[in-house]
Amino acid sequence: MRLPWRRTWVCPHCFRRISRAQIAYVCASGAACAEDRRLASANPRTGSAECGTCGRTTTRLRCTACAGRLPEGYLRTPGKLVALAGPVSSGKSTYIGVLVHELLHRLGAELDAALLPCDDDTMADYHERYERHLYDEQQTVPKTAEHDADRPLVHRLSRTRRGRFGRADKRVLSLVFLDTAGERFASRDRMETELRYFLAADAVVVLVDPQDLPGAPVKDGDGVPGRSGDVLARVLGHLGGGGKVTVPVAVALTKADLLWPHLPDNSPLHRTRRPGPVFDADDRAAVHAELQALLRRWQEHQLDARLDQFCTDYQLFALSTLGTAPRRGGGLGLGGVVRPHRVEDPLMWLLHRFGALDRGRG
Ligand SMILES: Nc1nc2c(ncn2[C@@H]2O[C@H](COP(=O)(O)OP(=O)(O)O)[C@@H](O)[C@H]2O)c(=O)[nH]1
Ligand SMILES: [Mg+2]
Ligand SMILES: [Zn+2]
Ligand SMILES: [Zn+2]
């Protein structure tokens, strides 16, 4: 299998632009010969290489700039890189934990899409950092540790759309979650990594805690007014590089369960999405308009105004990852069960934007 001609790729771990010369083969047989530099000199044109130590054939590739593994099929189809942003406590870790779980156990089948972790370590990492807390121990995800914040979690979501005349059309989203630990950067290195992260992004999901919006009717808010605006400004600054942001930006209010008691029964935010690999444009428009109206009512219209001014393509979302507020001490409410509401909405919109969903009904 020949590899496609391409000058450079973006490494999904360090977000550096890497050329063929910066991509090396890794022996698949184990750690013993994994660092064999002779692998690096193999010709990538054949799509595989022989390990200089043990002679086995391997197709595993890694970025020599950071040693991160390139996902299977990455050179041929790098896909669209989807990035995640949000201030501390906006719900990033919980979102990652629940969204990946949903994609693996429910949504993947519903959308006829496959979620593939970058490698076995990604799977173990996901379980250790997110899944086991929520689904085994029925606890909230602990605060993100500094050392975890350096390693993005890389998954590939691929879907084959049946196009006209039955033509199969494969689309891939590379979901790259760099789960930041704190607001202030621990190092210059990390700051530069984040900058590269947003520069490389083909789309971004920005999470906002409604408790950070002073006008929102949420009780016992431990939010920080203005925090979301600051993060948004920084992210939009990175994305736009001084000009308008042209990549799709999904801005999602997390912890929507806190808002539900204050919304009328017929609010579109209460509804659930109709299942299936189809984009529901009417529902999307209703939710977006409702959130614009709510922001206006909460005197938070500068958030929407800022988005309108700096983004050519953005949408507002409201989701709940847990379905209810966790108990004091970190136990999950609702009898310990994670009950997500509309967590997939931003992704559905992005899949639609990138032409990965089926044509609408009716
Ligand atoms: N009420 C409610 N709280 C949530 C939800 N998702 C997360 N939280 C809580 O919000 C806090 C911050 O979440 P976390 O994912 O750690 O945020 P991060 O700092 O952005 O990674 C934690 O106490 C979570 O339990 C939700 O859907 N509803
Ligand atoms: Mg976190
Ligand atoms: Zn790299
Ligand atoms: Zn070997």
Image: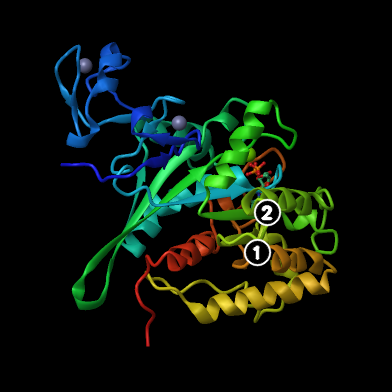
**Three-letter code for the amino acid on which mark 1 is drawn:** Cys
Quarter of the image that includes the N terminus = top left
In this view, the residue in front, 238 or 146, is 238
Around disc 1, counting alpha carbons within 10 Å, would you say few (fewer than 14), some (14 to 19), or many (20 or more)?
A: many
Left or right, 111 with reference to 234: left
Left or right, 9 with reference to 29: right
Mark 2 beta carbon near ligand 1 (under 8 Å): no
In this view, the residue in front, 285 or 334, is 285
Which structural element holds mark 2?
helix
Picture residue at 19% right of the left edge, 26% below the top: 49
The quadrant where residue 29 appears: top left
Picture residue at 53% right of the left edge, 62% below the top: 346
Residue 284 versus residue 248 in the image, above or below: below
Around disc 2, counting alpha carbons within 10 Å, would you say few (fewer than 14), some (14 to 19), or many (20 or more)?
A: many
Which structural element holds mark 1?
loop
Where is residue 156 shown, x and y percent of the image? 38, 47
Where is residue 63 shown, x and y percent of the image? 39, 29
Q: Which residue lies furthest to the bottom in this view?
A: 362
Q: Label 1, on which residue?
A: 311
Picture residue at 50% right of the left edge, 33% below the top: 14
Decide if residue 336 is in sight here. no
Left or right, 235 with reference to 215: left
Where is residue 186 shown, x and y percent of the image? 70, 27
**Three-letter code for the amino acid on which mark 2 is drawn:** Leu
Task: Identify the mark nearer the N-term, 2 or 1.
Answer: 2
CB-based contact (under 8 Å), mark 2 and mark 1: yes
In this view, the residue in front, 15 or 183, is 15
Residue 318 versus residue 336 in the image, above or below: below
Q: Label 2, on which residue?
A: 236
In this view, the residue in front, 111 or 314, is 314
The quadrant where residue 48 appears: top left
Where is residue 165 shown, x and y percent of the image? 20, 77
